[in-house]
Image: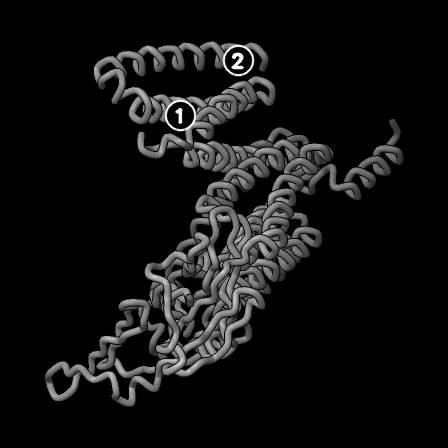
C-alpha cells in the first residue's frame, strides 16, 4: 500500500532536469549573445487615438510618416505636439542597458537597412500571454487580449532578454518599436 | 490473533494511512460494503457535477456584469466565494454526517480561487510581470492544496496538488523563458513531453498506494500528452522534413507505450498507443511518401501498415488478457 518511490523519483526528476537545462541555457546565453552594434527603439506615450506615426529607415536615416486626424480629415504633421510623446532609447549591447535619447539624436544616427544586425542578430518581441489568464488584460478585464511584452535579442542558437528602460516597464506606455541597428 | 493485537495492528495501519475509514466501515456493513461504496461514488458524481454547474453559473453571472463591478466587488465575488467554498468544505469535512459533500465545495473553491488570486494581483497591481503573477498564483495554490492534502488526505486534494504543481512548472518555465536562453520555438512541446512523462510515472508510483484511484486518470491524461508532444515535434510538411529525427524518435516511444500495457497490465496504454500509431502512419505517409511514391502507392503501404498495427494490438491485447 506504499507509494512507489522509484517511480515518484523519476516523475519528479524529469521536470527538474528540464528546468535545470532551461536555467543553464539562460546563464550561457548571457555570454554568447553579444551583437557588434547597438540599436534604437522607441515607445509612444500617447493615448490620442487620432494620432499615428509610422517610422522608416530611408538611406540609413530615420524618417517619420505622421497622421493626425483632425477636423474630419487626415493631415500630415510630424511637428505636432503628439510627436513629443515619442520616447527614444539607445540600447547598448555591451552593457545590456537602455539609455534615453532625444528624437534629434535618434535622427542623427545612421542605421543598417533591415531588421537583422551585421552579425545576424534580430530583436523580437516576446509576449507574456498570461498563461491560463490570457483572456484577461492588465486591468483585470475579460477578453482584453494579450499584454506584457519584452524584447528578446535573438541569435541563431541563443537569445537574451533586453533590459528595457524602467520608464517603459514602469509605466507600460506602449509597445517598444524597433528602429534599427546603429552603424 | 486476539482482539487486542488486531486493534493494535488496525491502529498502526490507520496511522500509516494504509487503510481508510471507508474500508473499515465496509467491514461493519458486511455484504453491503460494495453497495455502500457504489452509493458513495454515485453521490460523489452528483456533487462534482453540481459543483461544476455552480462554477459555470458564477462565471456566466460574473462575465456578463464584470465591467459593472468595482474592484472590491470583483474581489468578493471571486476570491471571497472561493475562500467561503473552501471554508465550507473544511466544515463539512469535519462533520461526517455530510459524507463527501465537502468535495463539491472544494471543487468550487479550486475552480474559483485562481480567478480570485488573479484579481488580487492584477487589480491591485501587486506584481506587474504577468509571468511572475502566474508563477506566484500557482505556488500559492500549490501550497494550499499541498497543505490540505497532508491535513485531510483526500484524493481530490491530490488531484488539485498535481494540477497546481503542473501549472507552477509551466509558469516557471515561461518565466525563465522570458529571460532568453536557447532559441526554441517548441518550448510548449517539450513542456508537454515532460509533464506527460511525469504523469505516467506518478500514476505508476500511486498504483499500490492509498491513492490508487487516481492512477487510471493520470495514465489517461499523461500518455496522450507525452506522445502528443513528440508527435507535434515531428514533421507535418515535406518542406520541414528536417524534423525527421523526432519522427524517428516517435517510433520507439509509441512501442514503449504499447508494450507498457503488458508490463503494467493497463489497457489504456494499448488504446492510446494504437491511436497514436495509426495517426503516425497517416502522418508519415502524407509527409514522406505521398510525393515520391504517389498517393495510391502510399495509401497501399499505409493500409498494410494499419493491418499490421491491428494485428499487433490484437496480439498485445491477448497477452494482456492472459497475463491478468
Q: Is residue B186 visible?
A: yes
Q: Where is residue A101 in the image (x, y as percent from the top left)?
A: 44, 80
Q: In this rendering, would A59 be left or right of A68? A: right
Q: Mark 1 points at which residue?
A: B275
Instruction: Evaluate whether label 1 is on the same chain as label 2.
Output: yes
The vertical placement of B291 against A148, above or below, is above
- Location of the N terminus of chain B (image quadrant): top right
Q: Pick the residue in front: B71 or A55.
A: A55
Residue A97 on image: x %, y %: 54, 71
**Which quadrant would residue B299 be assigned to in this image?**
top left
Q: Residues within 10 Å of mark 1 (few under 14, many from 20)?
A: some
Image mark for residue B321? 2
Q: In this view, does B114 lie to the left or right of B284?
A: right
Q: Is residue B81 visible?
A: no
Residue occupying image coordinates x 66% and y 53%:
B146
B75, A159: nearer the viewer: A159
- Under circle 2, the secondary element is helix
Q: Which chain carries label 2?
A: B
Amino acid at each position: 500500500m506504499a507509494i512507489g518511490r522509484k517511480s515518484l523519483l523519476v516523475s519528479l526528476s524529469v521536470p527538474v532536469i528540464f528546468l535545470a537545462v532551461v536555467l543553464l541555457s539562460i546563464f550561457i546565453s548571457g555570454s554568447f549573445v553579444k551583437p557588434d552594434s547597438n540599436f534604437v527603439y522607441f515607445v509612444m506615450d500617447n493615448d490620442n487615438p487620432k494620432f499615428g506615426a509610422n517610422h522608416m529607415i530611408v538611406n540609413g536615416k530615420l524618417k517619420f510618416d505622421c497622421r493626425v486626424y483632425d477636423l474630419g480629415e487626415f493631415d500630415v504633421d510630424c511637428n505636432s505636439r503628439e510627436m513629443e510623446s515619442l520616447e527614444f532609447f539607445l540600447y547598448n549591447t555591451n552593457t545590456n542597458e537602455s539609455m534615453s535619447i532625444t528624437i534629434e539624436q535618434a535622427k542623427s544616427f545612421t542605421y543598417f537597412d533591415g531588421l537583422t544586425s551585421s552579425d545576424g542578430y534580430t530583436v523580437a518581441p516576446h509576449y507574456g500571454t498570461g498563461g491560463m489568464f490570457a483572456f484577461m488584460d492588465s486591468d483585470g478585464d475579460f477578453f482584453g487580449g494579450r499584454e506584457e511584452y519584452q524584447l528578446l535579442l535573438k541569435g541563431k542558437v541563443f537569445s537574451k532578454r533586453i533590459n528595457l528602460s524602467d520608464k517603459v516597464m514602469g509605466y507600460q506606455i506602449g509597445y517598444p518599436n524597433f528602429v534599427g541597428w546603429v552603424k | 490473533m486476539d482482539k487486542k493485537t488486531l486493534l493494535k495492528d488496525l491502529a498502526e495501519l490507520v496511522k500509516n494511512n494504509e487503510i481508510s475509514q471507508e474500508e473499515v466501515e465496509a467491514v461493519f456493513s458486511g455484504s453491503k460494503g460494495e453497495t455502500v461504496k457504489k452509493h458513495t461514488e454515485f453521490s460523489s458524481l452528483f456533487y462534482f457535477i453540481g459543483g461544476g454547474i455552480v462554477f459555470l453559473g458564477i462565471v456566466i453571472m460574473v462575465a456578463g456584469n464584470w465591467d459593472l463591478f468595482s474592484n472590491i466587488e470583483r474581489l468578493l465575488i471571486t476570491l471571497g466565494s472561493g475562500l467561503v467554498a473552501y471554508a465550507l468544505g473544511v466544515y463539512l469535512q469535519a462533520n461526517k454526517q455530510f459524507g463527501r459533500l465537502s468535495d463539491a465545495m472544494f471543487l468550487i473553491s479550486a475552480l474559483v480561487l485562481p480567478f480570485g488570486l488573479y484579481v488580487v494581483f492584477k487589480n491591485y497591481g501587486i506584481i506587474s510581470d504577468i509571468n511572475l503573477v502566474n508563477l506566484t498564483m500557482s505556488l500559492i495554490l500549490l501550497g494550499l492544496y499541498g497543505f490540505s492534502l497532508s491535513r485531510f488526505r483526500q484524493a481530490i486534494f491530490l488531484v488539485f496538488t498535481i494540477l497546481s504543481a503542473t501549472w507552477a512548472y509551466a509558469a516557471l518555465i515561461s518565466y525563465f523563458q522570458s529571460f532568453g536562453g536557447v532559441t526554441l520555438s517548441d518550448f510548449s512541446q517539450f513542456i508537454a513531453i515532460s509533464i506527460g512523462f511525469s504523469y505516467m510515472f506518478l500514476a505508476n508510483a500511486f498504483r499500490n498506494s492509498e491513492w490508487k484511484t487516481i492512477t487510471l486518470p493520470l495514465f489517461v491524461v499523461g500518455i496522450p500528452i507525452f506522445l502528443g508532444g513528440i508527435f507535434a515535434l515531428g514533421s507535418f510538411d515535406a518542406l520541414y522534413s528536417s524534423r525527421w529525427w523526432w519522427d524517428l524518435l516517435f517510433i520507439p516511444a509509441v512501442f514503449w507505450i504499447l508494450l507498457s500495457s503488458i508490463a503494467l497490465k493497463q489497457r489504456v496504454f494499448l488504446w492510446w498507443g494504437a491511436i497514436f500509431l495509426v495517426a503516425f502512419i497517416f502522418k508519415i505517409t502524407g509527409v514522406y511518401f505521398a510525393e515520391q511514391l504517389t498517393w495510391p502507392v502510399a495509401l497501399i503501404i499505409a493500409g498494410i501498415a494499419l493491418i499490421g498495427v491491428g494485428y499487433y494490438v490484437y496480439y498485445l491485447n491477448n497477452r494482456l488478457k492472459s497475463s491478468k
